[in-house]
Image (cartoon, grey):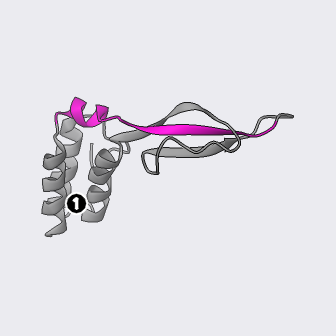
Amino acid sequence: MYGLPHVLKTRADFENMHALAIAGGIPAAEAIRRWQALINGQTTYEFDRVLGSSEEPDGPEPGYRVMMSEQDGQQPERHQFRMVSNSGQLEILGYQEADVFTKIEELEAL
C-alpha cells in the first residue's frame, strides 16, 4: 500500500503516518491533525437527565452541556449531558497522552 490509509486503526498505522510525514511523503499538518484527533477523542458527552424548564444544569460547560430536544408534536425538552472520559482508542493503541504530544512536537519542528 502506498500513502496513508483513510482510517488509521492500529499503532502501526499511526507510526507509519508519522514516518511518512517526517520523510515528507505527506504534509506534516495532516499528521498533526490525526494525532490531535486522538487527544480530542478522549472525552465525550453522554446523556445525564432531562432538566425542568427553569432548572439550572448541575455545573458549567465544558463539564455539562444543555441541548434542546424536539420531538414531533411534543414540547421541546432540555437535556443535560455530562462530559465523561473516553480514552479507549488511545489506550487500545498503547499510547499515553504525553507520547502523542511528543509526536506532535516532532512534526511541528519540521
To which quarter of the image does residue 63 belong? top left
Image coordinates for residue 59, horizontal then vertical, percent: 47, 45
Name the side, left or right, on which 15 lies relative to 80: left
The answer to whether 87 is drawn above or below residue 29 in the figure is: above
14 and 41: which is toward the camera: 41
Q: Which residue is mark 1?
A: 25
Image coordinates for residue 35, horizontal then vertical, percent: 26, 51
Name the side, left or right, on which 15 lies relative to 8: left
Name the residue at 22% across, 44% down. Answer: 14
Q: Which residues are magenta?
A: 75-94
To which quarter of the image does residue 103 belong? bottom left
Within the magenta stretch, is there residue 87?
A: yes
User: Would residue 3 be visible to someone looking at this image?
Assistant: no
46 and 6: which is toward the camera: 46
Image coordinates for residue 11, horizontal then vertical, percent: 20, 37
108 and 96: which is toward the camera: 96
Dot 1, crowdedness within 10 Å: few (<14), some or many (≥20)?
Answer: some
The answer to whether 19 is drawn above or below residue 53 in the figure is: below
Name the residue at 32% across, 57% down. Answer: 33
72 and 77: which is toward the camera: 77
